[in-house]
Amino acid sequence: MITTTRPAALPWTALARGALLSFTLFAAASASAQETPPQGTAPSGETDTMAQSTAREQDLTDQQARAHFSVGRAMYEAGRFAEAAQEFQQAYDLSHRPQLLYNLYVAYRDSSQLVRARDALRQYLAEVEDAPNRLHLMSRLEALEAQVAEEERARAESEAELAAAEQATAEAEAARERAEAQAAQLRHVRPWWPWVVFGVGLAAAGVGVPLGVDAASQADAVRLRCTQPDGSLLCRSSADVSIANGAVTQAAVADALWIAGAAAAASGLVLAFLVPDDIVDEPAPAVSAACGPTGCFASLTLSLR
């Protein structure tokens, strides 16, 4: 009997790992095969790109720096420019190769970190005197410096406007607090003069009424003495005539006093309720009271101006 053995099928996970390993090796080989552009050649386009990088992976002797450089290139190709800049920065910190400053310049520029891009390009041109496309990169540096200066000017203006707005807000808040504090000092006081009118009128009526009663009493006494047997009034005594005349005058005065006093008292009473309050710019009297072990006490605080 002949027995044949068939090979077992590879699991899909093994196939996926193999494909991923092949792609990684191919990418590493492509990165290693990149050549440095010769000095003095112009870039293919108007914008500096990572393809014009002056750093190569095989030039990095430090293994960690090489790894960061490789990851940075991959991050940049994936559009993750800020993360690529971090990787290039770590590669530069480990290897101190000035050519990596170009990679930092491009990554920082594409991640909109213009200040860092300017600093990286300035340092690159300072450390690499024979940098490819030096004149072109110097013009790029001037443009970056102008753009950064413009952004800093705009930022300073914006900060000044914000500070002015905050100051205006603070001043308005302070004015509001002062107005509230001033309003707290104002208190409503009922006007006193209607009560004076009421009191004067009441006093006049109080004088006029008894004065009229006394005048009537004197007139009755004179009338009793001057009444004749036939019922006619005839005062034979000059004293009775004088008393009668005085009583008439006193009665007239009494009538004027109590009528005018009653009118004034009524007017004062009505005005006391109709006249609006006076606004006084002073704190209201402060009244406090408390009791303790030694007894109770009360205090009244007045503001005298």
Image: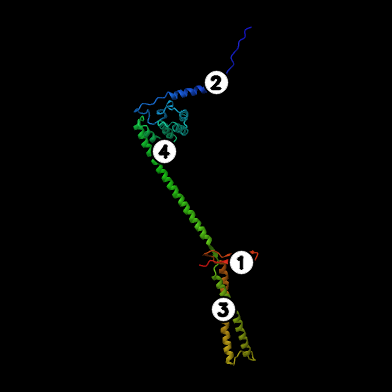
Total tally of numbered discs in the picture: 4
Q: Amino acid at mark 2?
A: Leu
Residue 248 in the image: state x and y as whole percent: 57, 84
Disc 1/disc 4 C-alpha distance (Å): 72 Å
Q: CA distance from mark 3 to mark 1?
A: 44 Å
**149 over 206 or under it: above or below:** above
Q: Earlier in the sequence, mark 2 or mark 3?
A: 2
Q: Which residue is mark 2?
A: 15
3D distance between C-alphas at marks 1 and 2: 97 Å
Q: Residue at x 56, y 68 (%)?
A: 272
Question: Of label 1 and label 2, which has the lower sequence position?
Answer: 2
Would residue 263 be seen by someone viewing this image from the given angle?
no
> Residue drawn 46% across and 50% down?
166
Q: Residues within 10 Å of mark 3 (few under 14, many from 20)?
A: many
How packed mark 2 is, by other alpha carbons closer than 10 Å (few <14, some 14-19, many 20 or more), is few
Q: Which mark is residue 163?
A: none
Which mark is drawn over residue 298? 1
Q: Amino acid at mark 3?
A: Leu
Which mark is first along the chain, 2 or 4? Answer: 2
